[in-house]
């Protein structure tokens, strides 16, 4: 009985195996050797996926011919070189900081107004020891009939109090004067736009296609087009260099390989390289404009303390006031010099030569790219030519802040002497 049960169990197992074995053998026969090898090897080891195609942000849009062209709606609002009104400079900031010092970026900021009130209170507190010392000198002078020192101190204290009281209005007046001067330069540019000079029939790209002649955005690359320029510049490299060499150093750079290998001739190479140089110079100009606003706000907040130091005797306060005036006026009005250079330098350049037959177009491409690069480069180095570079401005601001700290220490010591 036991043997019969085992016999039937074995017979049933054989039937099941014979039922499913042909199907598995057939599927194995159809499977390719590579698939069988992958299944035998198991799942692939974990690792980063291959880089996907990507590109830098670009505001250009497809044009009527299918190629990309600048979006006037976007670049007209550019922070650096966007459209600006000639006289309406008190409105909301947000565009054209190359030309105007907007109120909403400086004295109109709520935090600046709040901190200015605190600094003004500290400035009047700084004058208190000088007033106490002046009273002591007047009391001593009444018995000795020597009022010379007291009269000099009285004038310093009086001027210091008045200067602290009107410091905010003085800064506002100077900013408005700078803005009106910039408006005059923009009006000059409207009356005398960039010249239309051609090299073998091709105009020098002082302005972008489809923009008004008064636009500066052909020279100063808008911030939203920096990515467009970098994408174009990647075309001068080979795809293997971007995917393998650069991709091995920074893996995600390999995703730019689809932008590489698009340069067809030397003329195109010069054009793309020239746009990249303009983008780098535009970035440096943006840094100058941004740091300039920061320094203006610094001098604005330090104005009450600087003028409060005027009341201190010994000539310490007067030196601080001179440093404040030199630093603030330099930082504020250097923009006028840069705008003037940017506006007038293309008008001063001599007529460029017309090149002869050139199958590769090398000289034509170079002469087309040279004037905008020269104009923007001179604009960027103008502060250095005027001895108002970024390092100088920061050094003057530091010296002024150090002078204020010395004056405060001297005022504290004066207060102790007056108390005794």
Image (tube, rainbow, N blue to C red):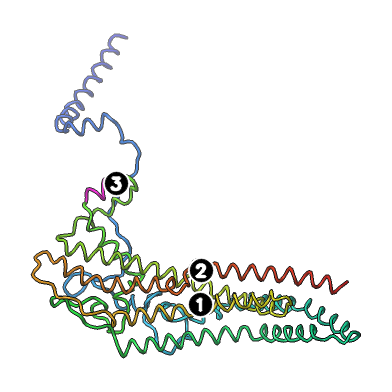
- The residue that disc 3 covers is 50
> Between disc 2 and disc 1, whose residue precedes?
1
Looking at the rendering, the stretch of residues picked out in magenta corresponds to: 239-244
Residue at horizontal 16%, vertical 70%?
364
The part of the image, by quadrant, that contains residue 196 is bottom left
> Pointer 2 and pointer 1: residues touching (CB < 8 Å)?
yes
Above or below, 385 relative to 49: below
> Pointer 1 and pointer 3: residues touching (CB < 8 Å)?
no
Seen as rendered, the residue at the extreme right is: 143
Return the residue nearer the eye: 313 or 132: 313
> Between disc 1 and disc 3, whose residue precedes?
3
Residue at horizontal 88%, vertical 83%?
139
Residue 102, position as x, y percentages in the image? 48, 81
> Pointer 2 and pointer 3: residues touching (CB < 8 Å)?
no
Return the residue nearer the eye: 53 or 137: 137
Q: Nearer the viewer, mark 2 or mark 3?
A: 2
Circle 2 Cα neighbour tier, 10 Å, few/some/many (<14 / 14–19 / ≥20): some
Circle 3 Cα neighbour tier, 10 Å, few/some/many (<14 / 14–19 / ≥20): few
Measured in 3D between alpha carbons, the distance from the residue under mark 1 to the one under mark 3, in whole angstroms, is 52 Å
- The residue that disc 2 covers is 392
């Amino acid at each position: 009985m036991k043997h019969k049960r085992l016999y039937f169990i074995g017979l049933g197992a054989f039937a099941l195996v014979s039922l499913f074995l042909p199907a598995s053998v057939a599927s194995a026969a159809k499977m390719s050797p590579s698939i069988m090898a992958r299944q035998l090897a198991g799942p692939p080891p974990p690792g980063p996926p291959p880089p996907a195609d990507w590109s830098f942000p670009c505001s250009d849009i497809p044009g009527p011919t299918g190629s990309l062209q600048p979006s006037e709606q976007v670049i007209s609002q550019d922070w650096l070189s966007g459209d600006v009104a000639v006289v309406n400079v008190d409105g909301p900031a947000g565009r054209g900081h190359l030309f105007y010092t907007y109120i909403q970026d400086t004295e109109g900021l709520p935090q600046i107004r709040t901190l200015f009130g605190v600094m003004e209170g500290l400035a009047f507190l700084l004058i208190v020891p000088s007033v106490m010392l002046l009273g002591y000198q007047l009391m001593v002078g009444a018995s000795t009939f020597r009022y010379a020192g007291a009269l000099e101190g009285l004038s310093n204290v009086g001027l210091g109090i008045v200067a602290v009281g009107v410091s905010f209005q003085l800064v506002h007046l100077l900013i408005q004067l700078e803005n009106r001067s910039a408006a005059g330069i923009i009006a000059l540019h409207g009356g005398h736009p960039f010249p239309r000079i051609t090299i073998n029939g091709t105009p020098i790209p002082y302005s972008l296609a489809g923009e008004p002649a008064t636009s500066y955005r052909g020279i100063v690359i808008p911030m939203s087009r920096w990515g467009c320029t970098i994408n174009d510049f990647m075309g001068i490299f080979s795809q293997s260099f971007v995917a393998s060499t650069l991709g091995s150093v920074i893996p995600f750079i390999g995703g730019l390989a689809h932008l590489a290998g698009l340069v067809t001739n030397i003329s195109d190479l010069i054009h793309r390289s020239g746009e990249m140089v303009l983008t780098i110079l535009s970035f440096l100009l943006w840094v100058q404009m941004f740091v300039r606003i920061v320094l203006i706000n610094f001098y604005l907040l330090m104005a009450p303390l600087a003028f409060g130091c005027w009341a201190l005797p010994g000539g310490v306060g007067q030196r601080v006031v001179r440093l404040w005036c030199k630093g603030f006026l330099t930082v504020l009005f250097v923009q006028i010099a840069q705008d003037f250079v940017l506006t007038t330098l293309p008008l001063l350049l001599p007529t460029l030569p017309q090149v002869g037959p050139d199958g590769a177009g090398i000289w034509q491409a170079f002469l087309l790219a040279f004037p905008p690069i020269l104009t923007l480069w001179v604009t960027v180095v103008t502060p250095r030519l005027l001895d108002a570079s970024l390092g100088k401005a920061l050094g003057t601001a530091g010296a002024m802040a150090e002078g204020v700290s010395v004056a405060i220490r001297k005022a504290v010591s004066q207060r102790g002497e007056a108390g005794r």
